[in-house]
Amino acid sequence: MDQIQLGMDFITAALGPLGPLYMLGLVGVIMILLSAPLAFKQKPDPLNRLKGSAVGLQRPQTADSAPVRLRYDGGQNRQLERLKPFIEPQDEKEYSATRLKLIQAGYRSRNAVSNFHLLRFILGVTLLTIGTLSVLVRSDTPGLSYVIMSVLIPGCIGYYAPDYWVERRRQVRQEDIVNGFPDALDLMLVCVEAGQSLDQSILRVATEVEKAYPALAEEFEMVSNEMRAGKDRVSVLRDMGERCGVPDISAFVTVLVQSATFGTSISDALRVYAAEMRDKRVMRAEEKANTLPTKLTLGTMMFTVPPLLIILIGPSVYTIATSLG
């Protein structure tokens, strides 16, 4: 006990009152660095023994020919593949929710979930390290509350900043889809009434609205490509509604599915739903116009009332102050 107390006194004298906390953090970093190689080391997969043993999958290699690959190797993502078990959520429901949120924000790459969690980890650790260094380089001895705030707040900001960014991108994209959907419906109705099929109408709409509403055009183009690839139309439309995450798109998908199920006219369904979407757009514009005076009240009070009071009451206050003085 005397040796432990002597060591604590030495650390406190050398590093200040928070010296034991610094030493604890240093020991944690050293343990992480020592255990990282063991954590990233993977056991050999028994299926890897089958590589190269299949007959007829590879061409004979010669001195002038390079080995032929039937599938993209993705060698640059091998390190990321090793990190997946440690950075991705293991719960299937949580993983699906994160994947859907990234898709609705416009991030559809294969490694989107891994990149998202890796970015959260890197930003959190980086800002946490910066906060720790800012405390260590101070000449005075800060209090414990200041140390905790200076270290934890940057770490939390770095960890949750990707969440805010993805959520913001998701809201902007959904707003773009909602604003362009009535015009897209009108154009689709014109194409259907002109004699084109629903698949051709969707492709034409994707081409026409690409400049004004790129997010909506991307969704329609994906629907057209999946239909041409042979996927079921009902599944394609439902996937579109899930990818967009917009109630108007989900209702539109329901209308098309019911029209295809009961054999009703698609043009009539589109005409009624397009009129409803136009009415909803007008109501949204009226709602924003009605909330505008309320939002302007605060600005009016801050920038109009104080100058007016200065002009009206200022001379009287100056005269009273002069008389009393």
Image (cartoon, helix red, strand yellow):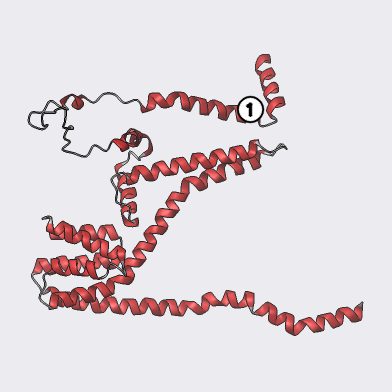
Q: Quadrant of residue 171 in the image? A: bottom left
Q: In front: 265, or 122? A: 122
> 10 Å neighbourhood of mark 1: few (<14), some, or many (≥20)?
some
Residue 273 location, x and y as percent? 22, 75
Compare residues 172 and 75 and report the one nearer the observer.
75
**Residue 34 in the figure: left or right of residue 200:** right
Q: Does 222 sit above or below residue 313?
A: above
Picture coordinates of residue 241, whole percent (x, y): 25, 61
**In the figure, 163 relative to 144: above or below?**
below
Q: Residue at x 10, y 32 (%)?
A: 57
As drawn, which residue projects farthest toward the front? Answer: 64
291 displayed left or right of 65:
right
Give the quadrant of residue 62.
Answer: top left
**Most foreground residue, 78 or 173:** 78
The relative height of residue 68 versus residue 30 in the rendered view (above or below) is below
Residue at x 19% of width, y 27% of height? 47
**Does residue 232 appear in this view?**
no
At which x and y percent is residue 72? Answer: 22, 39
Give the residue at mark 1: 20
Question: Tag 1: residue type?
Answer: Pro
Q: Is residue 61 visible?
A: yes
